[in-house]
Each structure stands twice: as C-alpha cells, then as structure tokens.
Image (spheres, rainbow, N blue to C red):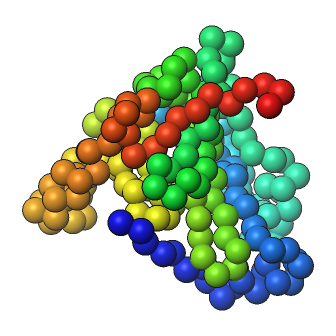
Amino acid sequence: MLRTIFASQEMATKIKLDKRSSLTIYSFFPIDPGDCECMAMVKEWKDKLLLTPPDKREALVEKTGHLVCPRDKSSMRRYEITCKVCGQVEGYCWATNSTLADFCDFHYVNWTDGELWYGCLTPNISPITQELTLECTCGQDTRDFRANMTLSAKKAIEIERGNSIGRKFGDQKSKFKVMEVRKNG
C-alpha cells in the first residue's frame, strides 16, 4: 500500500523562501521508553519551550541541536531504520542488537520537497510492550493499537491485526530494515 502525504502550502512557501530544494527534519527530542533516564531532560526542555516566546523557539532549537539521551551507550551500536517498501530512512537509534529490544535515543527523520512528505510519519512507543513502533509516509505501519481509546474496538482490532504483522525489528518479515551505522563509512 503506497500512500501520499502532501506538504502544506506553508511548508512549500518556506522551502521556496529559503531557496532550498527540500527540508529535512531530524527530531529534536529523543523518543524512548517511559522509564528511560532522559525523560527528566525531555520534560525540562518541553517546559522551557513552553516558556520561550513563539518567535524565539525555532532559533533556540537550532542553536541547541537535537537532544541526546544521556543513557550509557558504550555496549550499544547505532542503527539506521529504513522502510522496506519505499526505502526512506525512518530514523536512528542505539541498541545492543538489530532487534532493537533495548533501544534508546531514537530520532525520527522525515523530509519534504515542498510537495510531498517522505520518511517517518509517526513514531510510537507501544504502551503494552514499550517497543518502538513506526508509521512511514508510504503507509507501512507497525504502531500498537491494543490500548487505543479513541477508535471503536472493532476498528482498533482491525488495524492492530495488520500492524502486528512485520512489527519485530531484525526479523526477515519485518516491515522495516535495520542496519548498523558503521563509523567512517
């Protein structure tokens, strides 16, 4: 299933005014399980951004760069996750192996050419298993709907049935490919 996500007119105008051919977004906040030690840092930054005047937020984020989870990563490897259907990079994280069972410091990647969006649409931490789940702009989706509170039970079960297929990272049947990021190429 290939789907198209259109960019807003505002985004198209921003790219044109900045004289760029595209705009890439690497998430500012790390996405981690709820018990990760970076949650205090994330909360602190969310509070700081709430108190920052709206016209100064973008400059503050650009000056800071993306936030890095402080968890010890000395026994971990960095991985790149790509969609097996469209080939777009979905994001990067740290884990001890390609199953990403103990992942941390996930940062999603998406980009637009001013017409369409590509890459990661919705990263999600399963409320049931604390596993990383993703939705790609092309339609590949592994998000966990078992704790859904907004859709009808019938619709949530239907979506969960499809999304659970290919959810396991590092597995041959996974919807997303996990590759170790090698240093120096």
Placement of 121 over or under 54, stated as above or below: above
Quadrant location, the N terminus? bottom left
> Residue at horizontal 89%, vertical 79%?
19
Residue at the farthest left position: 154
Residue 52 x, y percent position in the rendering: 76, 61
> Residue at horizontal 43%, vertical 29%?
170
Q: Nearer the viewer, residue 183 or 134?
A: 183
Residue 165 x, y percent position in the rendering: 26, 45
Name the quadrant containing residue 25: bottom right
Residue 171 x, y percent position in the rendering: 38, 31
Q: Is residue 4 left or right of residue 22?
A: left
> Residue at horizontal 51%, vertical 20%?
97
Q: Nearer the viewer, residue 83 or 121?
A: 83
Name the quadrant containing residue 164: top left
Residue at the farthest top position: 75
Placement of 11 over or under 1, stated as above or below: below
Placement of 79 over or under 43, stated as above or below: above
> Residue at horizontal 51%, vertical 75%?
5
Q: In this view, does 7 lie to the left or right of 152?
A: right
Quadrant location, the C terminus? top right
Residue 73 x, y percent position in the rendering: 66, 18
Q: Which of 51 and 33 is in front in this view?
A: 33
Residue 125 in sight: no
Q: How many labels does the image show?
A: 0
Residue 66 in sight: yes
